[in-house]
Amino acid sequence: MDKRALQIAAKVGLLLVIIGFFLPISCGKNGFEISDTLRSSGKLFSADRTASILLYVLFVSALLGVVLLLINKHFIGLDWTLFAVSSGSGLFAVSLVSKYSEFSSIQVGGYLIVLGYLVTGICLLFATYKTIRSSSRLGDGHDTST
């Protein structure tokens, strides 16, 4: 696969994250419902409200990653940034809500989100490797057209 195909496959991984967010993630609730439950905790500055915001950051950054497929043709750094923001906010939100027993069981949406992150991460690693490899070949004077 060439670098562009790997970047597109990484966007498919982010699309899996978005789809997983709409499916039941835990306790029969999707990502938006979990976020609403956490936001209604009552305290303005609480871990629950922070986790609620982070869940929306997860969704929006994954959505931006897919939308930018139409704009972002060659710069892989933006893909890495959005992947890091989305997965980082998701991991931090999970660590904040892990204290609740009602969110301890993971359902299909949660598994799809994890699968999407794995696909995205692996594809971005290979795309980055191909980028570095092709730039080093260009510097050596080798022809990369084959």
Image (cartoon, rainbow, N blue to C red):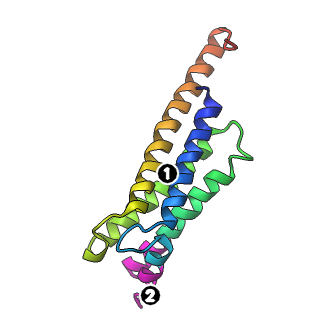
Packing grade of label 2 (10 A; few <14, some 14-19, many >=20) is: few
Region of the chain picked out in magenta, as a range? 36-53
Tell me the crowding category of disc 1: few under 14, some 14 to 19, or many 20 or more residues within 10 angstroms, Cα based.
some
Q: Which residue is mark 2?
A: 40
Q: The disc labelled 2 sits on which kind of residue?
A: Ser
- Percent coordinates x, y for residue 99 in the rendering: 26, 73
Q: Amino acid at mark 1?
A: Ala
- The answer to whether residue 51 is above or below residue 92 is below
| Residue 43 falls inside the magenta stretch | yes
Q: Residue at x 43, y 68 (%)?
A: 24
Q: Quick one: SS at disc 1? A: helix
Image quarter in which the C terminus is found: top right
Quadrant of res 94? bottom left
Residue 61: image x %, image y %?
57, 59
Instruction: Point out residue 35 in the picture as x, y percentages from the top left corner.
Output: 46, 76
Residue 48 appears left or right of 116: left
Quarter of the image with the N terminus is: top right
Residue sitting at x 61%, y 20%: 134
Quadrant for residue 104, please give it: bottom left
Which residue extends farthest right?
A: 71
Q: Residue at x 48, y 81 (%)?
A: 36
The residue at 47%/70% (across/down) is 31
Q: Which mark is residue 55?
A: none
Q: Quadrant of residue 77?
A: top right
Q: Helix or strand or loop: what does disc 2 sit on? A: loop
Write down the residue under mark 1. 84
